[in-house]
């Protein structure tokens, strides 16, 4: 056994780290896809993604989605306590439509008043305005009442949602099992001919890998919940990367 343990001079061992921008991500406890998608879109190590999980129980009903609102504060507080964050993104499109972006932001800012707050539904609207698209097609994973709340949210902000369609799924496990090929097939079949953009709604849907394929086939911008939220998070953090492979929004804007 060593007789003693020596102490090294640690005055010069620290640097500023390789992370320049920090995004906190609140993911649903049941979501299998969001965290992986953000990691896939992350351009390099200068952008850090830090995840906290919020309690959520399937099925994806209005009542269960609204129940997340009071939990946002404590979940946000778990994201790098006492350390710098540039933005916190709340990963639930339908939850934001029901709770409201402002209410989501208020709850998060009770824990982290110093950060910008990003939500997928608000991010989608900002992205559509950036792209100059007002008439949109929509394919949502949810049941009809939840989809209706999302459509109402978009239309209240001046968008025209043309013939929205939903898959009628209530469980994030099932949403995560919808194949990307099927997403392409369904989006092509329901996209209105006069749509100026197509939105694939749900953070648990495996849609980012098919955005460019759909843009090529449909000839219009295609947005997804995780893509628009990542785009808006980078902007809110002051990060100006252009990211290839995930559609026009990230590569051109």
Image (cartoon, grey):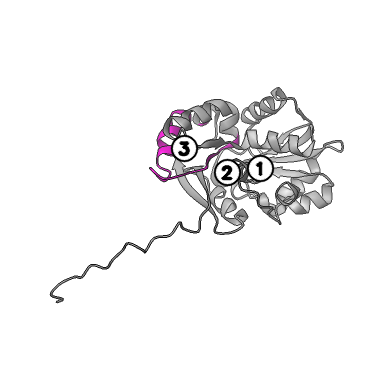
Farthest residue to the bottom: give it: 1
Q: Which residues are magenta?
A: 65-93
- The spot of residue 120 in percent (x, y) is 61, 38
- The spot of residue 251 in percent (x, y) is 73, 52
**Which quadrant would residue 81 be assigned to in this image?**
top left
Circle 3 sits on which residue? 56
Circle 2 sits on which residue? 237
Q: Which residue is rendered at x = 48% and y = 44% of the image?
A: 85
Earlier-in-chain disc, 3 versus 2: 3
Q: Which residue is rendered at x = 58% and y = 36% of the image?
A: 119
Q: Secondary structure at mark 2?
A: helix
Earlier-in-chain disc, 1 versus 3: 3
Please indicate, yes or no, whether residue 138 appears anywhere in the rendered image. no
Tell which of 17 and 29 is nearer to you. 17
Asked if the residue at tag 1 contacts the one at tag 2, i.e. Cβ–Cβ closer than 8 Å, the answer is no
* Residue 81 belongs to magenta span: yes
Classify 10 Å Cα crowding around label 2: few (below 14), some (14-19), many (20 and above).
some
Location of residue 207 with respect to 9 vertically, above or below:
above
Circle 1 sits on which residue? 228
Q: Secondary structure at mark 3?
A: loop
Q: Nearer the viewer, mark 3 or mark 2?
A: 2
Apparent side of residue 10 relative to residue 239 in the rendered image (left or right)? left
Earlier-in-chain disc, 2 versus 1: 1
- The spot of residue 141 in percent (x, y) is 64, 39
């Amino acid at each position: 056994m060593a007789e003693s343990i020596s102490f090294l001079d640690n005055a010069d061992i620290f640097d500023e780290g390789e992370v320049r921008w920090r995004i906190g991500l609140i993911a649903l406890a049941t979501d299998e896809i969001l965290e992986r998608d953000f990691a896939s879109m992350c351009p390099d190590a200068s952008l850090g993604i830090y995840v906290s999980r919020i309690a959520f129980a399937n099925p994806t009903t209005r009542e269960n989605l609204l129940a997340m609102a009071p939990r946002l504060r404590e979940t946000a507080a778990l994201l790098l306590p006492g350390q710098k964050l540039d933005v916190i993104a709340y990963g639930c499109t339908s939850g934001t439509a029901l709770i409201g972006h402002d209410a989501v932001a208020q709850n998060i800012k009770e824990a982290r008043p110093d950060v910008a707050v990003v939500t997928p539904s608000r991010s989608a609207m900002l992205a559509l305005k950036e792209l100059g698209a007002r008439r949109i097609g929509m394919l949502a994973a949810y049941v009809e009442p939840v989809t209706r709340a999302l459509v109402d949210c978009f239309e209240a902000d001046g968008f025209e949602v043309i013939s929205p369609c939903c898959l009628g799924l209530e469980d994030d496990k099932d949403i995560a099992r919808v194949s990307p090929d099927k997403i392409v097939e369904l989006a092509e079949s329901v996209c209105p001919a006069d749509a100026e953009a197509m939105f694939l709604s749900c953070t648990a849907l495996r849609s980012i890998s098919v955005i460019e394929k759909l843009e090529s086939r449909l000839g219009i911008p295609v947005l997804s919940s995780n893509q628009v939220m990542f785009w808006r998070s980078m902007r809110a953090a002051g990060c100006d990367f252009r990211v290839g492979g995930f559609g026009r929004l990230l590569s051109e804007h």
